[in-house]
Amino acid sequence: MTESYVCPHCGRLEDRPYRVRLIILTCPDCGLNGRFIHESLVERLDEIPDADRPDDWSEMPLDDRLRFAIEEGLLEISFTGPL
């Protein structure tokens, strides 16, 4: 069984045989280095209401969205517990 991780810049999916919150990779498609986020966290980011998002949300890389959501208390995740 594999888990999917999403490039924060271009959205490419990378599959890995382990389950963690994020992995740091250089994307083979866009060539940028970043924190590929587990697809379940991307789904949770998509559920954040538009009213709580900053104006540049759609332009922010996924890893910046995740950081913003955590810092603003919009998303609570444990980095040591289950996803």
Image: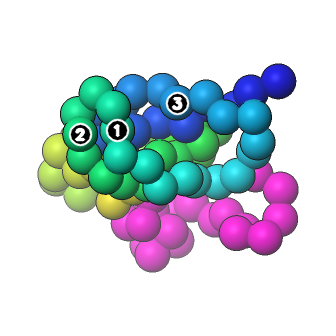
- Could you classify mark 1 by the number of other residues whose Cα lies within 10 Å: few (under 14), some (14-19), or many (20 or more)? many
Query: In the figure, is residue 64 to the left or right of 76?
Result: left
Question: Does dot 3 land on a helix, a strand or a loop?
Answer: strand
Q: Which residue has dot 3 on it? A: 14
Kindly check if marks 1 and 3 are in contact, taking CB atoms under 8 A apart as contact.
Answer: yes
Say whether residue 24 is magenta.
no
The residue drawn where x is 47% and y is 55% is 24
Which residue is at a point 43% across and 72% down the rendered structure image?
72
Q: What residue sits right under mark 2 in the picture?
A: 31
Image quarter hosting the N terminus: top right
Decide which of 10, 83 is in the foreground and name it. Answer: 10
Residue 64 picture quarter: bottom left
User: What type is the residue that disc 1 sits on?
Assistant: Cys
Badge 3 density bin: few <14, some 14–19, many ≥20, Cα 10 Å: some
Instruction: Please identify the dominant SS of the magenta region.
Output: loop
Q: Position of residue 56 (x, y in %)?
A: 16, 51
At label 2, counting other C-alpha atoms closer than 10 Å, the crowd grade (few under 14, some 14-19, many 20 or more) is few
Q: Is residue 75 left or right of residue 49?
A: right
Between discs 1 and 3, the one toward the N terminus: 3
Separation of marks 3 and 2 at Cα, in angstroms = 14 Å
Q: Position of residue 83 (x, y in %)?
A: 76, 51
**Residue 58 location, x and y as percent?**
22, 41
Amino acid tagged 2: Gly
The relative height of residue 65 versus residue 17 in the rendered view (above or below) is below
Q: Is residue 15 above or below residue 59?
A: above
In the image, residue 68 sits, relative to residue 82, either above or below, namely: below
Q: Which residue is mark 1?
A: 27
The three-letter code of the residue at mark 3 reads: Glu
| Element type at mark 1 | loop
Stretch in magenta = 66-83
Disc count in the image?
Answer: 3
Asked if the residues shown at circle 1 and circle 2 are in contact, with their CB atoms under 8 angstroms apart, the answer is yes
